[in-house]
Amino acid sequence: MNAFKETAFEFGQVCEKLNSGESKMILIYFVYGLAFFVLGVAILIYPKKGSAFKLAKNLWLIGAFGIIHGINEWLEMFLLIPGFEDFLLLKIMGSFILPLSFTFLIQFGVKIIAESKKRFSWIKSLTVLLPLAWALIFGLSKEPLLYGNIWARYLLAFPGTILTAYALMLQLENFNDRPWLSSKRSLIFTVLSFTIYGVLSGLSTPKAGFFPASFLNYQVFLRLVGLPVQFFRSLCALTIAISLGHILAVFNFETAKLNKLAAILERKVEERTNELQHNYNLQTVMSSFLHLSLEDISFAEFLKKTLDLFLSIPWLALEKKGAIFLVEDEPGVLVLKAHYGLDETIQKACSRVFFGRCLCGRAALTKEVEFADSLDERHETSCAGIAPHGHYCTPILHAGKVLGVINIYLKQGQWRDKRKEGFLVTLAEALAGAIERKRAEQALQKYREELEEKVKERTEEFKLAKNKAEIASGAKSDFLANMSHELRTPLNSVIGFSEVLQDQLFGNLNEKQQEYIRNILSSSEHLLSLINDILDLSKVESGKMEFMATKLILRELLEGSINMLREKALKHNLNLALEIEQPVDSEIEVDERKLKQIMFNLLDNAIKFTSAGGSIWVRAKKPDTEHLEISVKDTGLGIKSEDRPKLFKEFIQVGSLLTKKHEGTGLGLALTKKLVEMHGGKIWAESEFGQGSKFSFTIPISQSIQKA
């Protein structure tokens, strides 16, 4: 500012040598140019980076305009000084500098308006069209210096200042917040000043022989107003410079605020970086510890390696000394289980530490970290020649239970670090989980070894029992087969002679004798049926029953089975029916005799337990392409739910009332089940007590399927 005053004073002395009118115009041009030049320099050097205002990034265009236009006004000033008025080079320079300065204003206005008003995007073309139009007029006119000056004001100065004023007006809404209200007023003055300046600089031109330069020119303005138009332009320039200078303070305030925020952010970033580094160190150690805990090593080796890992963490600044104590069989006593860097005297003195004694015992008793920066009165266990040191004694806790203590040595004088302490607590928690898991693994291993030993013993017992059972089963089967053969021979004779006597071939029998003969014959036939079932069952169990697969027509086998028992059904007034689905009425491959025996047993049971007037159905179908399903359904009494699980048991008949009414061996269904299974099939029963029963079984259509 002092330099500005000194320059103005010196310039004033020069003007005193000139006549009054010339000196005033020179002074006006000087102030006029100085105002714009200082404004341009201030805008370009003022800090605007990081500003939240759109204005900031484009304001340099006004700065460029200010510097170039200020130089242009100084050139005009020099042309008024005697000796320079005919300096052609100055006039040529002015002819190009003037339009160039206003081109920057057009650029500024177009950019701000196009960004704020998308519908005015076409306005970008003005940055090319207006300078191009001026260049054409300048190049084609007979008086390029005069016409170039005039048309630079019409085509560039007036549009450029009006566009700039409108662009600045669009920024007013960004200054509504309380801190910017004074800057908003300055911006309003800037808008008004640019608008007035646009009219004065764009429409008032040197006099020429065409309209409107012949009507609106410097001479007419001077005659009407009494002062030269340059005087009012300089006032506008001063107003613009002062107003925009005040707006620049906004950017200074923003910069200070951003610097403050940057400092806060930098501090937070540093804190966060330290925190992340701490977490990374923690995760690294924990990862190494978890890998260590999964190694297949002994528990003692695991504790030793864990202590080595903890003591090797560099940023903890620990001494390379420490120990791990655990509570074992004796409650309230810590036992030294792992150590590093401790001499034999310390090892012996600290082999067993009671809860509450010394730092380790205190940590176990209080379940809190005990810290010491030196050898104080809490060091109850001490040895001669022990070096000064401190401690972190961290309890190892699991579900509130003390498992042990980690004792870490520190250099004397270290202050208590909550972060390091928290880190050690985390390590202790992880170690507690690993200790519990290792102990559980040891217990499990011991249990497995004991279990394996018991399994071996039981396996030997089972093998022995199995051998005995197989021997007994073989003996039973042999006995049954031999006894059945020995019993059937005389029994057949008894049945034969009983039938002869019943037919009275050797004379008449009285009624009592006939009753006895009927009882003898019935009992003999029942006994023979029982012997046959026992013999078949024993053959199946011993694997001596042969399976003879043959191909046959299913319908013929089922009809034959029904015909075999039809007379018995008629005696009981029962209806027998056969239903075969069409795809099943074809050839099958089965053991014919065994399938007939299956059908005989099921039909015989149905006849036996169905009351007179009832019905029995035999149905055959294919549940899939490879199997055959046959069912025997009756309208008999049915089976109670509690009796169903016993249906296929040997020597068991369900229902006490039915057993008394109907004789049976209790082997028919058991034998039927085994014969079905010999075919590779399965059998099941469906029944509701009082609603009848349905016995179904499935077998492969071809025995080649069963073998596959």
Image (spheres, rainbow, N blue to C red):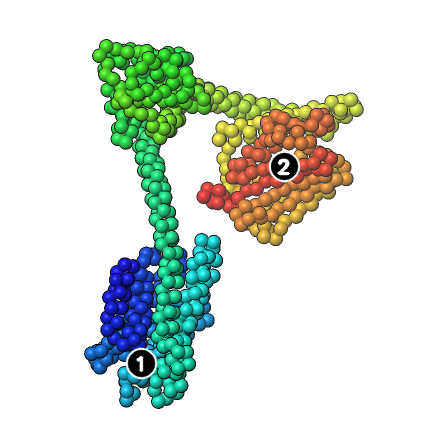
Location of residue 119 with respect to 336 vertically, above or below = below
Does residue 316 appear in the picture of this structure? yes
Name the image quarter holding the C terminus: top left
Name the spot of residue 545 as percent of width and height, x first.
51, 33
- Residue at image coords 36%, 60%: 245
In the image: residue 217, left or right of residue 577: left
Q: Name the one closer to the observer, 439 or 375.
A: 375
> Does 139 sit above or below residue 243?
below
Q: Earlier in the sequence, mark 1 or mark 2?
A: 1
Judge from the rendering whether residue 426 lies leftward or rightward of residue 317; answer left or right: right
Mark 1 lies on a secondary structure that is: helix
**Figure quadrant of the N terminus:** bottom left
Kindly identify the amino acid type of the residue bearing the numbered disc 2: Ala
- Residue 393 location, quadrant: top left
Give the residue displayed 45% in from the left and 60% down from the top.
184
Q: Position of residue 510 (x, y in %)?
A: 79, 23
Marks 1/2: CA–CA distance: 118 Å
Q: Which residue is mark 2?
A: 685
The relative height of residue 87 versus residue 559 in the rendered view (above or below) is below
Q: Nearer the viewer, residue 400 or 222?
A: 222
Q: Which residue is mark 1?
A: 149
Q: Amino acid at mark 1?
A: Asn
**Element at badge 2?**
strand
x and y, in percent, of residue 398 in the image: 42, 23
